[in-house]
Image: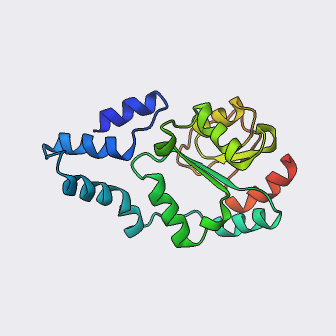
C-alpha cells in the first residue's frame, strides 16, 4: 500500500479513501468485497485521529482569532494522506477551530495534492478571491511555498523544524511561531 500511495504522491495525486481501503485489504489478503469489513477498516483508518489527537502548534486558535477579527477570509488547503478530509473537519470542529474556516480543500476529495495548481485554484474559487489577494502559510518548501508562488499567491514559510535543512527561496516571509503570522499578513496585504 505504501508504494501505491508514494507513487500517487510523486504525481501530485491523492488516492481517495475507498482506494486506500481497497489497497490495504488486498495487501492484507482480506475480502475487499465484504461491505462490513470495508466500512470497519475505513472507519478505523479515518477516525483514529479523533481518538488519538495530534499535537497542535502553540498559538493556533489565538492566531485564527486574530485573523478573523480583521474579517479576513480564512481557508485551509491540506494534503491529507492517510487522514481524510471529513475526519480532519471533525477534528477541527471538536477542538473549536472549525468555524474559522470559510473554505477547506482536501487532497483526498479533490484527488490532487499541493503543489498541483488545481488545489490552490479550488481555494480561490471557494473563498471568492484572486491569487494576489491570498497569503498562503505552509511548512513544506515545495508543496506549500513553491506551489503557492507558482499560482500567484504570496507565501509564508512556517519553519517548524520538520525539515531542518530545508530552504524556501520563493517565500515572501518566514515564521517560526504561529503568533508571528498576523503581523506578517498585515505587511503583505
Left or right relative to 9: residue 152:
right
Rendered position, 50 above or below 181: below
Q: Nearer the viewer, residue 138 or 113?
A: 113
Seen at 44% across and 29% down, the residue is 10
In percent of width and height, residue 152 lies at: 75, 33
Residue 55 seen in render: no
Residue 106 seen in render: yes
Seen at 54% across and 65% down, the residue is 92
**Picture mark count:** 0
Seen at 51% across and 72% down, the residue is 94
* Quarter residue 186 falls in: bottom right
Q: How is the image coloured?
A: rainbow
Left or right relative to 143: residue 38:
left
Left or right relative to 78: residue 151:
right
Rendered position, 55 above or below 37: below
In percent of width and height, residue 143 lies at: 58, 36
Seen at 81% across and 62% down, the residue is 71
Identify the residue at the far top of this view. 11
Quadrant of image for the N terminus: top left
In percent of width and height, residue 108 lies at: 46, 44
In percent of width and height, residue 24 lies at: 24, 44
Amino acid at each position: 500500500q505504501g508504494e501505491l500511495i508514494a507513487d500517487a504522491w510523486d504525481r501530485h495525486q491523492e488516492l481517495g479513501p475507498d482506494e486506500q481501503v481497497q489497497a490495504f485489504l488486498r495487501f492484507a489478503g482480506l475480502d475487499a468485497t465484504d461491505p462490513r469489513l470495508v466500512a470497519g477498516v475505513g472507519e478505523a483508518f479515518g477516525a483514529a485521529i479523533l481518538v488519538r489527537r495530534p499535537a497542535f502548534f502553540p498559538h493556533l486558535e489565538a492566531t485564527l482569532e486574530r485573523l478573523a477579527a480583521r474579517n479576513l477570509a480564512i481557508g485551509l488547503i491540506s494534503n491529507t494522506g492517510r487522514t481524510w478530509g471529513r475526519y480532519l473537519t471533525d477534528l477541527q470542529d471538536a477542538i473549536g477551530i472549525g468555524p474559522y474556516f470559510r473554505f477547506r480543500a482536501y487532497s483526498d476529495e479533490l484527488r490532487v495534492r499541493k503543489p498541483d495548481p488545481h488545489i490552490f485554484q479550488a481555494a480561490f474559487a471557494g473563498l471568492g478571491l484572486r491569487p494576489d489577494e491570498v497569503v498562503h502559510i505552509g511548512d513544506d518548501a515545495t508543496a506549500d511555498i513553491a506551489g503557492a508562488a507558482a499560482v500567484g499567491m504570496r507565501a509564508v514559510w512556517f519553519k517548524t523544524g520538520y525539515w531542518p535543512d530545508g530552504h524556501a527561496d520563493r517565500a515572501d516571509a518566514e515564521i517560526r511561531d504561529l503568533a508571528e503570522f498576523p503581523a506578517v499578513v498585515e505587511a503583505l496585504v
